[in-house]
Amino acid sequence: MTHPILLGSYPNHSYEHPPHSSHSDTPILEEEKGQKQGPIDFRQRLRHFTWAWYTLTMSTGGLALLIASQPNTFEGLKEIGLAVYLFNILLMALVCSLMAARFIFHGGLLASLTHDREGLFFPTFWLSIATIITGLERYFGDNPEPSFSKALQVLFWLYCACTFAVATLQYSYLFSSVTYRLQTMMPSWILPAFPVMLSGTIASVIAERQPDHSSIPIVTAGVTFQGLGFCISFMMYSHYIGRLMESGLPNREHRPGMFICVGPPAFTALALVGMAQGLPDTFSVMDSMDNAADGRMVEILALAAGAFLWALSLWFFCVALIAVVRSPPTAFHLSWWAMVFPNTGFTLATITLGKAFGSKAIGGVGSAMSICVICMWIFVFVNHIRAVYRQDIMYPGKDEDVSE
């Protein structure tokens, strides 16, 4: 059985038109929309509370990081960001509690992890954890206690180990037990590699305040796992571009998932520049005696690579934006959060490059992009709540726990 996977997608209808078709749009089929069977109680709806709900917490956590990184600040901005961070902690606790309740009442934990569609969203849990760890440094990093730095080190190494295991085991399972057609490839195939890639992003934030003997191993691991995640993503990009050339754009309801491609190069640019700047003053290359020159050389290389990757993110962003504007989705899916989290990384990369180049103009662009991301978060959040109330999600046949 063949199953295309994408954020919020439904197999068999994942592309807008067949090859060589002259039609620019295809009506959404009734089975894709899902047929309402009437009101059901909350316990039954809980059966359809899927791993994709962690897209909410990863996006909210990313928003808190974005607020903390603003180049143009005002009094009270950090407090606003802290409020968003704490709100995300509450959301994380709520989502985890509801997920636990689902498995307690209905069972099926292993089945959800091995499900051909829902299982692919399990990595969004780890993406949420990454934003929480990074937020600890951003909002509580002024704590001079050595125990705080040690706690961040432990969290970082645990995160690296767990996400590497997720990337390895989940792809091994997909390679051996599920078949996907390249004709229907979408960026969500990258998701199992996304969490391990954010090890570099975490390292770029926490390395600067770590002791020298801890900072260099953290940066080394960050570069290693960032490279692993981006290389896997880059290999997937070739299939994605080929799929677009052969089969055209995805169905309008699934186009928000195209923004996932914005994330890997943006977060890699952010991580490379941040890790280069976070290297200790004692860092040297090949036992060189000029530590300052070595550090500056690494930073220049990181800036060049960061600008290169930022342009790739910009291109993917423009392609996805044009696709969504041409045919906006009409029904809410959890894939709408793809319009927030990857673009948060894109905005953070813009701000980081602006600071590194000392450009107020780039910083201004980053601030304007931040406003857009905040507005998009509010828009998606309101529609998310409304979709739950209207039974457009958490309802039989409408969530990622359905195979077709």
Image (cartoon, rainbow, N blue to C red):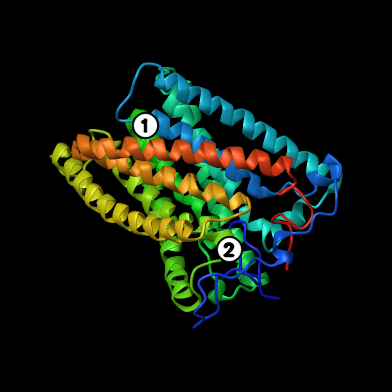
Quadrant for the N terminus, please: bottom right
Q: Residue at x 50, y 53 (%)?
A: 194
Which of 150/345 is in front? 345
Q: Which mark is residue 216?
A: none
What x and y, as percent, mark residue 253? 59, 59
Please tell me how crowded label 2 is: few (under 14), some (14-19), or many (20+) other residues with Cα within 10 Å.
some
Circle 1: residue type: Ser
Where is residue 178 shown, x and y percent of the image?
66, 70
The correct choice, above or below, for 122 with respect to 153 in the image is: below
- Crowding at dot 1, Cα within 10 Å, few <14 / some 14-19 / many 20+, comes out as many
Taking the image as shown, residue 129 lies to the left or right of residue 49, namely: left
Q: Quadrant of the C terminus?
A: bottom right
Relative to 171, 224 lies left or right: left
Please, is residue 291 above or below residue 229 in the view?
Answer: above
Location of residue 393 in the rendering, given as x and y in whole percent from the top left corner: 71, 49
The answer for how far apart the CA atoms under marks 2 and 1 are is: 33 Å
Residue at image coords 13%, 41%? 293
Above or below residue 345? Residue 117 is: below
Q: In which image quadrant can residue 381 be found?
A: top right
SS class, disc 1: loop
Locate residue 101, reporting x and y percent.
79, 39
Left or right? Give the position of 369 relative to 14: left
Q: Is residue 267 left or right of residue 53?
A: left
Q: Which residue is labeled 2 in the image?
A: 171
Q: Amino acid at mark 2?
A: Tyr
Sequence-wise first label, 2 or 1: 1
Quickly name the residue at label 1.
69
Residue in the foreground of this view, choosing between 282 and 327: 327
Q: Residue 262 sits in which quadrant?
A: bottom left
On the question of residue 154 being in view, the answer is no
Q: What SS does tag 2 mark?
A: helix
